[in-house]
Image (cartoon, rainbow, N blue to C red):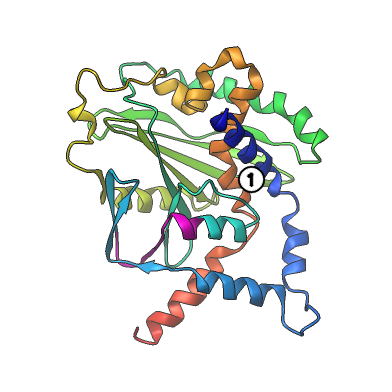
Amino acid sequence: MKTTLRWLTLLVLAGAWQSPPARAADAGAPDASGSTQQDEQDRQFAALHWVKGPASEAIAGNSTLKVPEGFVYLDRADTKKFLELNHNLGDGQEVMIAPAEGEWTAYLEFDDGGYVKDDEKIDADALLKSLQQNTEAANDERKQRGWEPLHVTGWATPPAYNAATKRLEWATLLSSNGHENANFFTKILGRRGHTTVVLVSSTRQLPASEAQLDQVLEGYAFNAGETYAEWQPGDKVAEYGLAALILGGAAAVATKKGLWGVLAGFLAAAWKAIAAAVVGIGAWLRKRFARTTDAGS
């Protein structure tokens, strides 16, 4: 029940991306004190504990991420605050990494659902059809909640699994309210579960963003004893395979819970890309860290 409630909570948050132009206008409106809402948001962004690379950060107690020079990182607590500042609520488990120049952001989170067997073939056309049907079926509910309809318009990158790196990757094109975003996923398989990496980027910058993220992930690894190759008989095995990871992981196999459970799982994974379109965090990062670099600190 706790997991289901979390999915539904994230599903509600998916509706946060409703009217970017209106919010942009509000951000520049002076308040009663003569300052602006944007100034206050800048202050709150600056108050977060930004870790500047190069640095090495422990993730979920079972892996390590090397933050390269020219990148910034937020731990779980500050990532949650960052998401709230973007009119979203995190679950407190994600961490964030982004280039200091701000072209994209990425979120990492570990799921301890168990060892995922990687011997399943992937039918990209069938999976896309499922994603589109599920998302369209959810739009009636979204409209009842006052949210804009959400559409999966296609693959930006069809799903593919790399057996050498134990990484499953794909990217979807999502549109809502006249805006289109790219939502790039990486699932890194480990002994006791998998790490999900969600890249938030514009469609125009997606190829360059993917390439940069790939370089960053060369510095991510499960710790000794936690790698996929170190699975042992008796360890927990996930109830789902590679295809189900694309459709929402555990939610995708819980068909007895009905379509809404599957939709919740899918949209819980997809919401960050939509919500992140609201705030121009890229401009803030460039302004903040370019100024710091110029100052010689």
In percent of the image, x 61 and y 23: which residue is there?
Answer: 261
- Does residue 279 appear left or right of residue 248 in this picture? right
Part of the protein shown in magenta: 67-79
Q: Residue at x 62, y 46 (%)?
A: 274
The image shows residue 40 at horizontal and vertical percentages of 65, 75
Residue furthest to the top in view is 256
Q: Quadrant of residue 72?
A: bottom left
To which residue does mark 1 refer? 180
What count of labels does the image hold? 1
Q: Is residue 72 magenta?
A: yes
Give the crowd class for mark 1: few <14, some 14-19, many >=20 residues within 10 Å: some
The N terminus sits in image quarter: top right
Percent coordinates x, y for residue 180 in the rendering: 63, 45
The vertical placement of 287 against 127, above or below, is below
Q: Nearer the viewer, residue 283 or 234?
A: 234
| Mark 1, secondary structure of its residue | strand
Q: Quadrant of residue 42?
A: bottom right
Which image quadrant is residue 110 in? top left
Location of the C terminus by quadrant is: bottom left
- Residue nearer the viewer, 102 or 142: 142
Q: 42 or 282: nearer the eye? A: 42
Residue 181, placed above or below residue 288: above
Residue at (35%, 46%) from the top-left corner? 60
Please tell me which residue lies in front, 159 or 40.
Answer: 40
> Vertical placement of 122 versus 140: above or below?
above
Amino acid at pointer 1: Glu
Left or right of 207: which side holds 53?
left
Residue drawn where x is 38% and y is 29% of the image:
160
Question: Is 132 a magenta residue?
Answer: no
Q: Position of residue 108 (x, y in %)?
A: 41, 46
Q: Position of residue 48 (x, y in %)?
A: 49, 68
